[in-house]
Image (spheres, rainbow, N blue to C red):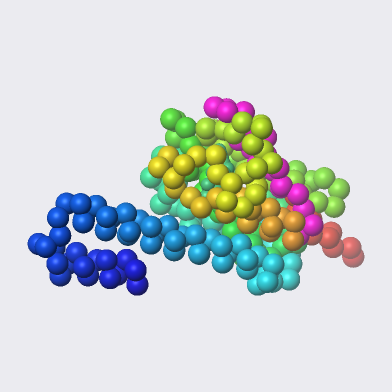
Amino acid sequence: MVSGFLQLLVQRHNERLDKEAHEYIGFAVDGAARMRALIHDLLGYSRVARHGKPAAPTSAEATLDEVLLHLGTAIAESGGEVTHDPLPTVVVDETQLMQLLQNLIGNAVKFRGKVPPRIHVSAKRNGSEWVFSVRDNGIGIDPQHFGRIFQIFQRLHNRDEYAGTGIGLAVCKKIVERHGGRIWVESQPGNGSTFHFTLPAAKEKTQ
Ligand code: ADP
């Protein structure tokens, strides 16, 4: 509604508005778009616990394929490529696994360096859980910020450099912890980042 009425103002009163007025309207439209993104992401954050579905055996590979479809345009525009090893079946809320992979791969594309993003997803069994890794060749993160980035609203860049609300990794942490897992990152500035998270393995069928 806010941006709609601002657009109407421009359409109906264009001649009466000077350059400065157009500039102010531009700031207000940007503000409205940011507010919408923030509310959308905050709602997503608050829904992780309240609207979560029960965990069920889910193919991580099929889920990743779906995420790559959603992110197809962003990946293609970046000139990037996402590869993966064979991925296991895990016991999760499928929608939340999708959200988790989408946030991590979306970030790997967004925080790319000068070369096209190369992103690789893999998983290693560790007892009753799987350790997933999402590796990128992007700008990397200074180890002093490893704890901060998983907190809500904590960003290492301003909006002019990279768009975002600072909620994505907090959502990832909440999703992983809701499934009894952990999430952490390994990185060096300029040398890419690898985000690891654990999820419960599906029980082997005994006959
Ligand atoms: P947003 O993407 O909206 O900034 P996130 O919570 O997803 O918020 O990420 C928090 C911060 O962590 C980002 O602002 C960025 O500084 C850093 N970050 C996240 N993912 C990556 C990545 N793959 N490479 C480098 N930095 C990252």
Left or right placement of residue 111 versus residue 4 in this view: right
Q: Residue 167 at what x, y percent from top left?
A: 57, 54
- Is 32 magenta? The answer is no
x 49%, y 60%: residue? 38
Tell me if I can see residue 170 in this picture.
yes
Location of the N terminus by quadrant is bottom left
Residues in magenta?
179-197
x 27%, y 55%: residue? 24
* Vertical order, 15 against 151 (above or below): below
The answer to which of 172 and 3 lies nearer the viewer is: 3
Residue 21 falls in image quadrant: bottom left
* Vertical order, 43 against 153 (above or below): below
x 47%, y 32%: residue? 113
Q: Residue 133 at what x, y percent from top left?
A: 67, 42
x 68%, y 58%: residue? 175
Location of the C terminus by quadrant is bottom right
Left or right placement of residue 96 versus residue 17 in this view: right
Tell me if I can see residue 105 in this picture.
no
The answer to which of 19 and 191 lies nearer the viewer is: 19
Q: Residue 8 at what x, y percent from top left?
A: 22, 70
Q: Going by the picture, which residue comes out furthest to the left?
A: 15
* Vertical order, 15 against 165 (above or below): below
Left or right placement of residue 72 versus residue 17 in this view: right
Q: Residue 91 at what x, y percent from top left?
A: 75, 61
Residue 206 falls in image quadrant: bottom right
Query: What is the tally of numbered marks visible in this picture?
Result: 0
- Is 190 magenta? The answer is yes
